[in-house]
Image (spheres, rainbow, N blue to C red):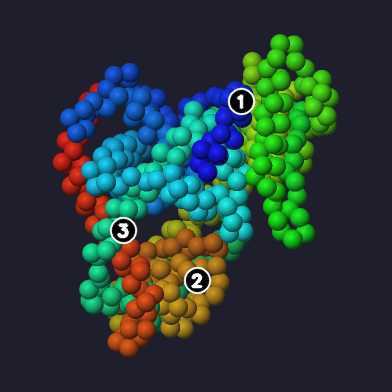
Amino acid sequence: MVNLIRRFQQPLLVTLTIFVIIAFVVLYGGPGAQLDKLGADNIGKIYGRNVSTAEYRSIGRQFEITRLLGMFDLIIPLAQNARTMQEAVDNYVWNTLVLRQEAKNLGILPTETQITEAIQRMPAFQTNGQYDHSRYTNALQSALAPRGMGAEQFEELIRDSLRLQSIRDVINASSTPAPDELAAAYRKQYQKMEASVVRFSRTEIAKAVTISEEDLKTTFEARKETLKTPEKRKVELVTFPLPAVDKDGKRPEPETIQKLADKASDFSGALLEPGAKFEEVAQRFGVEVKTTGLFAPGDRVEELANQPRVSSAAFQLTVEKPVSEAVGSPKGYFVLHLLETQAARPLSLEEAKEQLTESLKSERTKETLSLKAAEAKTKIAEAIKAGKAFGEAAEASGLKAETLEAFSRSDSKLTGPDATLIQNSAADLAEGQISAPIEGPEGMLLVYLSKRLPVDAAEIDKKKEDLLPMLETQRTDGLLGEWMERQRAAAGVQINQGR
């Protein structure tokens, strides 16, 4: 099946104009900028052999793909507890090399069948719980191809995932939580708490915030280099729409989708012919040419079926390369031709006034809320030390404390947009402690934990089946991290300085 999928992709990937995106966007900004700083020499050593810059880059670029496809079970163990972008990329690359070698030593060799099944199980490639081949082809075209990657590189990424899962399974088989761990986990998730909360309304604070003309002028002068109109594009395009789902909910067959992808690919390839004109090629293929108005990044564009991926592709076009490759989307395949570019220009004070007013008001409201909540916490804490109850202390500061019905982190009758914030904050407090000011959807709040209610041993036993999988996963994750550190140390990783 994997070879079949790969065969389907070849005509499309060969005929498309593949370009490499230098800057990735992942976690702290993207590994691409870091990877491109590497020189042409070896990057370091592992298991006594040199690791070339090309090999490092190849694995490093897989890091972005794992994020885009939501493969966090692979990212987290391999990137470990990175604090910077460079550290995250380094960890991922070196740990991947360790994983591959140690899996080989253990005889873990994922089969073609396992790879195919793993691809079909991935949530990123499913629609209504079923494998959707169009999602797979879209990923290859929009995520992998622009990074110089194809089906073979993606299958290697899946092999890494299967290797790691096999090692996790071995570790998990010997990982059994102790009774005290079970009790601690129950208390963390299900122990009932009694708490109170004081809220500070963002709306009320905002009413008192005013922005003067002098404020606007000063801020405009300080920020005018960044105050610009958005760049806009106008394109003409053709669409190869996917067939609609029929009345029984049946999706188009993969073969149908592939034929459509091939047709889009052929159209894109025809535009590379000398003297090719967009309108004439469209007539030859029997497809309608549509034209958009000028649009900015993030705008909804009806002619582009309101597909962000397609509108984003328009901003990758240039005067030198005005025609896109076939762009896949859930609505079908698009080929774009750049007609007009409207460059960004600086805003005048008058044009920027509304934007600046909103920005300054938001900033000052947030600052005032934070200061008011911090001051209130200090006053309430001092009053509690003097012997007052939390409610009395809040009232003495001109505030209203709301006493909440007993709740736990996982079982609560709390309602409202800040309910989860209150639950999680209270769970981390000691009895008699006030939380730091918490920013919620409607303002700031302070949470005070009065007491934790006694735990019933019988209730712990009832929740055992729910808690054990979570505890086993936590223990396995910890042991897997320790295993990775030991194996990496044994591999003798040496990273060249000054790279």
- Front in this rendered view, residue 389 or 330: 330
Residue 111: percent from the left, percent from the top? 40, 45
- Front in this rendered view, residue 187 or 394: 187
The answer to whether residue 315 is left or right of residue 71 is right
Q: Which residue is mark 1?
A: 16
Mark 3 or mark 2, whichever is nearer to me: 3
Residue 467 appears in view: yes
Label 1 is placed on what type of residue? Leu
Q: Which residue is mark 2?
A: 419
Residue 433 appears in view: no
Circle 2 SS class? helix
The correct choice, above or below, for 421 with respect to 170 in the image is: below
Q: Which residue is mark 3?
A: 169
Structural distance between the alpha carbons of marks 3 and 2: 36 Å
Does label 1 or label 3 sit earlier along the sequence?
1
**Other residues around mark 3 within 10 Å, as few (<14) / some (14–19) / many (≥20):** few
So how many labels did they put on this image?
3
- Front in this rendered view, residue 365 or 216: 365
Label 2 is placed on what type of residue? Ala
Label of residue 482 in the image: none
Residue 210: percent from the left, percent from the top? 60, 51
Mark 1 or mark 2, whichever is nearer to me: 1
Q: Residue placed at 54% from the left, 24% from the top?
A: 19
Quadrant of the drawing holding the C terminus: top left
Circle 3 SS class? helix
Residue 147: percent from the left, percent from the top? 49, 30
Picture quadrant where residue 472 is located: bottom left
Q: Residue placed at 33% from the left, 18% from the top?
A: 40
Q: Residue placed at 26% from the left, 39% from the top?
A: 101
Circle 1 SS class? loop
The answer to whether residue 173 is left or right of residue 210 is left
Labelled pair 1, 3 in contact (Cβ < 8 Å) = no
